[in-house]
Amino acid sequence: MEHRLGNPKNTIEVIQKYEFAFQKKFGQNFLIDTHVLEKIVSAAGVTKDDMVLEIGPGIGTMTQYLAEAARQVVAVEIDDNLIPILKDTLKEWDNVTVIHDDILKVDIRGLAEQYNEGRPIKVVANLPYYITTPIIMGLFEQNVPIDNITVMVQKEVADRMQVGPGSKDYGALSLAVQYYAQPYLVANVPPNCFIPRPNVGSAVIRLTRYPQPPVQVQDSALMFKLIRASFNQRRKTLQNGLNNSPDVPFSKEQIAAAIASLGLPEAVRGEKLTLEQFAGLANYFTEHCGGN
């Protein structure tokens, strides 16, 4: 175990051996804390029955831990310079497949078919800030068979994913995540657990996929249009936010009637509504206004 990359000395050796240069555009920060690595594997609940999809393996630090715990690991890495390094750091494990590609372009459902007979997979990732949301939403919206997603993200993104109405962090991401999954904060991770040190705190959050969404909505696409419109202009009332949005095709009167139908005051702001209330709003439009 002493040659493991979770040990900072070994990480530095590999970086020097390959003269690896960190790329700002890929938001690269490598984890060098064995406790955090162990926490991630245990939070994801990885067993020998599992296929794990790892997004952004870097130099293979987490991959080594996952390979010990899982039946099969498929790691998707975008950076050309890391591919030869991964070949080296993962050479002892025969249950790891590295795919050199952009995760947003990969057919993940196809990977689940190929490596896991289409059964739900576990996803583990250490994600750069700017791409967290598109990756996570892509995994949920494309109906990929997923058991849970355990990700390292910027602390404020983790906060946003798990808060409820009325908090300043509450927004479209909170609602979208909570429609698809149950969020659970695994650990806060300070900057000194990484090379290079990021200038913000990070957190590990686990999103456990719901078999069925927790709210009944006839048209989820319409619900998310309403959610986005109501948070696009946070300071505005819900009514004005929906009224001003080109994506919401209902009249001022229809919007007022929908808000009233939920028993909400007409000056209510979108940030006060629960997921259930947004679902109610969407269902009202679907039933009374011919949908979108």
Image (cartoon, helix red, strand yellow):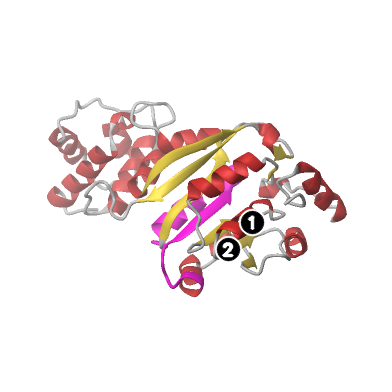
Q: Check if residue 120 falls in the magenta segment.
A: yes
Mark 1–mark 2 distance (CA, rounded to whole Å): 8 Å
Amino acid under disc 2: Val
For the residue carrying disc 1, how many other residues have a C-alpha within 10 Å: few (<14), some (14-19), or many (20+)? many
Which range is magenta?
Answer: 115-144
Q: Is residue 154 left or right of residue 209?
A: right
Element type where label 1 sits in the image: helix
53 shown above or below 110: above
Q: In this view, does 172 lie to the left or right of 46?
A: left
Residue at the image point whose x is 55% and y is 46% from the top: 40
Q: Percent position (x, y) of residue 3?
A: 77, 52
Quadrant assignment, res 59 = bottom right
Q: Percent position (x, y) of residue 147?
A: 41, 56
Residue indicated by mark 1: 63
147 shown above or below 29: below
Residue indicated by mark 2: 73
For the residue carrying disc 2, how many other residues have a C-alpha within 10 Å: few (<14), some (14-19), or many (20+)? many
